[in-house]
């Protein structure tokens, strides 16, 4: 494992343990050159569906892209990285469990929106405004109205 701080290729594992549901191994490592510590996660590489974009292009499911999108939506919101990772785990699991070879970008976006709604309402609205490409304030207000209705009195 290459050190993220100095790029040195040698490190030693200080601690290993199963994370959450046991499907991921968390390892604390120490660089043998700069002695800084970092964490890596090891998981079984599953076969994930290909994502079919709106323009018909196909690209592999990218967990890092998913986490990056969740983090952007949750930027400056009281949502921990652990909760973002758990949401990404759940979305990835849903994609795997569908047992389909392809999933559309809009289906994946719907999964993301469902999880963001539970994480943080502001993050949900941020993501929805980009994902749904609101053309005007009326569309935006309609989506906010749906959010308010779903919360109930």
Image (cartoon, rainbow, N blue to C red):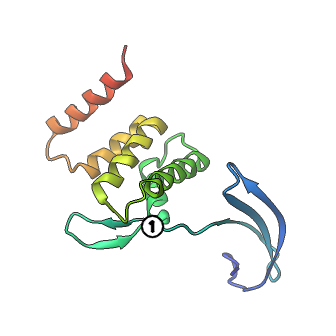
Q: Where is residue 3 in the image (x, y as percent from the top left)?
A: 70, 78
Count the numbered circles shown: 1
Q: Where is residue 43 in the image (x, y as percent from the top left)?
A: 64, 65
Residue 146 left/right relative to 94 = left
Q: Which of 141 and 76 is in front in this view?
A: 141
Residue 76 left/right relative to 28 = left
Q: Nearer the viewer, residue 97 or 64?
A: 97
Which residue is tagged 1? 62
Q: Position of residue 67 (x, y in %)?
A: 49, 58
Q: In which quarter of the image is the N terminus?
A: bottom right
Residue occupying image coordinates x 45% and y 52%: 70
Q: Nearer the viewer, residue 20 or 47?
A: 47
Residue occupying image coordinates x 76% and y 65%: 27
Occupied quadrant, residue 98: bottom left
Q: Position of residue 34 (x, y in %)?
A: 79, 79
Please tell me whether residue 31 is drawn above or below residue 147 in the rendered image.
below
């Amino acid at each position: 494992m290459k050190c993220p701080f100095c790029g040195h290729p040698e490190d030693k594992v200080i601690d290993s343990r199963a994370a959450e549901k046991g499907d991921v191994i968390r390892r604390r490592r120490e660089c043998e050159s700069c002695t800084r510590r970092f964490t890596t996660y090891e998981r079984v590489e599953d076969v994930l569906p290909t994502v079919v974009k709106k323009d018909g292009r196909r690209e592999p499911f990218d967990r890092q892209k998913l986490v990056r999108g969740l983090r952007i939506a949750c930027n400056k919101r009281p949502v921990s990285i652990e909760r973002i990772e758990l949401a990404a785990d759940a979305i990835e699991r849903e994609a795997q469990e569908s047992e389909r070879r392809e999933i559309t970008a809009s289906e994946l976006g719907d999964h993301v929106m469902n999880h963001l709604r539970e994480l943080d309402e502001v993050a949900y609205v941020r993501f929805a405004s980009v994902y749904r490409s609101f053309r005007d304030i009326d569309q935006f207000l309609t989506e906010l109205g749906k959010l308010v209705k779903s919360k109930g009195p």
